[in-house]
Amino acid sequence: MGEPPPQPEDPFPPAPPAAGDGWTPWDGPAAGADEPPAPPPPPKFCRQCGAAWDPTWTACPHCARSAASAPASLRGARPRRFHKHSLVPALAPYFAMLACTGFAGALLLSETVSEATAEIIATAGLTMVVLLWMTGTFQRVRPGLRQAEGKWYAAAIGLGMVTFGIALLMLRFLVATLGVEEYSYSEPLLAEGYGWGMVFLLICVQPAVIEELAFRGIIVSALEDVLSRREALIVSALMFMVLHLTVLSFPHLLVIGLVLGWLRVRSKSLYPCVLMHFIHNLLVVLAEMGGL
Amino acid sequence: MAAIKCPHCGVENPEGGAFCESCGKALPSGAAGGPRVVSGDAIATTGAGQTVQAAQLRKQTREAVIALFAVGVLQALGGALLYFILKDAREVDPNVPTVVLTMSLVLAAIYGALGFWARKSPLPATIVGLVLYLSLIGVSAVIDPATIGQGIIIKLLIIVALAKGVQAGVKYRQLREEMAKTGTAPLA
């Protein structure tokens, strides 16, 4: 009992009747033509690439292969959107910090509080703002919260001394040429009876920790969404400079900010930056203590 | 729908194909002699398209640079004006006019430097320009709230100009990203 071998499918079935035979396009099928039109035969060659077409195909695999290797844009993949509002995560913390300083300054100028109290209010406000902001951006700042190699801490101490020297020279130059009084950071606090311990906390410790977390932590990581790493470091150093709001200090503040940014990148950690900033501010206070 | 007759075998092919479905030979391309319309991602693949992109980039950087230089000039002029006013004022410490002038010139120099930076990288430069200006406005508003109203129109115009500069910087960055995707660089 043998069955006849299966007939191979006719690869080239006869063409369907050409349009015009049996029905007119304008009126629809003429009466009597009640068979559905035959499906178009498979092509013999792909009309996009000319490859010989196997009748079992429903799509040309050669075209699909070259489409797969084409760059994403030609495939029509959705391009990465650049959101304008991604500047907000970088600028919002800055303006929040500026608002703290402004608020304290307004209180001082309206003579509601003394200079020392205004300084304490500003410091407390800045600390709260930055710590609060950290709760939302912790994952982004976290990579910087790791131990660096010992050599970077040594470098931080050395760099802190160098930037102190630079700042001293620049300020002395400006005081000599313009005749402005040099501003003392510790005097307002001491004048109101706060001890050197308070001075140490408010001027050496807090700015080092909080400003590094803010500028080299939160703001740089937010800016890197929008700018290249180098641009992000420069912009963050410039913002650090502007936040201090003393135009005559801008030159040395910019230098410090750029060095801190460099240190952050090379040491891959925020801790050397905190140390360097601390050393710099400590030397400022010691110089004021020693009557320099 | 216009069908294309294959010049080799005579079979009619539906429109849109490049090769004849019956004999596999190349079909003549459709709109011979007409303009080739190129759009979207394919713009960067043509010389004319790249020139257009380069022009778009230049337009954005120009907007950013002009905004920053304009603010710098205004800052210098304002400082010079204040200098002469304060010099002749009576109850003012003689140092003050010089200090004010110096600060204004330092700020003008900063905006000028930002303007030069904007020629290569408009976005970071305009961000800093806007932050700087808003910070200083904020400070002077706190120091003397009465001065907020002085020159408020100019101040608002400056803020708008700097904000538009940031927008131009953003647009520049977007154009660059699109061009990076198609792997092309603009001509000149």
Image (cartoon, rainbow, N blue to C red):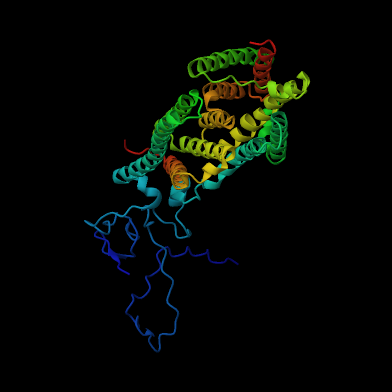
Of all residues, the one furthest to the bottom in this rendering is A31
Rendering quarter of residue A136 = top right
A241 versus A8 height, above or below: above
Rendered location of residue A49, percent (x, y): 37, 52
Rendered location of residue A292, percent (x, y): 63, 10
For the point 37% across and 55% down, which residue is it?
A48
Q: Residue A195 or A108: which is nearer the viewer?
A: A108
A252 versus A220 height, above or below: above
Of all residues, the one furthest to the left in this rendering is B33
Rendered location of residue A77, percent (x, y): 49, 50
In the shown orientation, is residue A88 left or right of residue B105?
right
Q: Residue B49 or B162: which is nearer the viewer?
A: B162
Which quadrant would the C terminus of chain B be assigned to in this image?
top left
Which quadrant would the N terminus of chain B be assigned to in this image?
bottom left
Q: Is residue A83 visible?
A: no
Rendered location of residue A261, percent (x, y): 58, 25
Rendering quarter of residue A18 = bottom left
For the point 51% across and 35% down, which residue is it?
B132
Q: Residue B21 or B93: which is nearer the viewer?
A: B93
Q: Is residue A208 visible?
A: yes
Give the total of numbered labels. Answer: 0
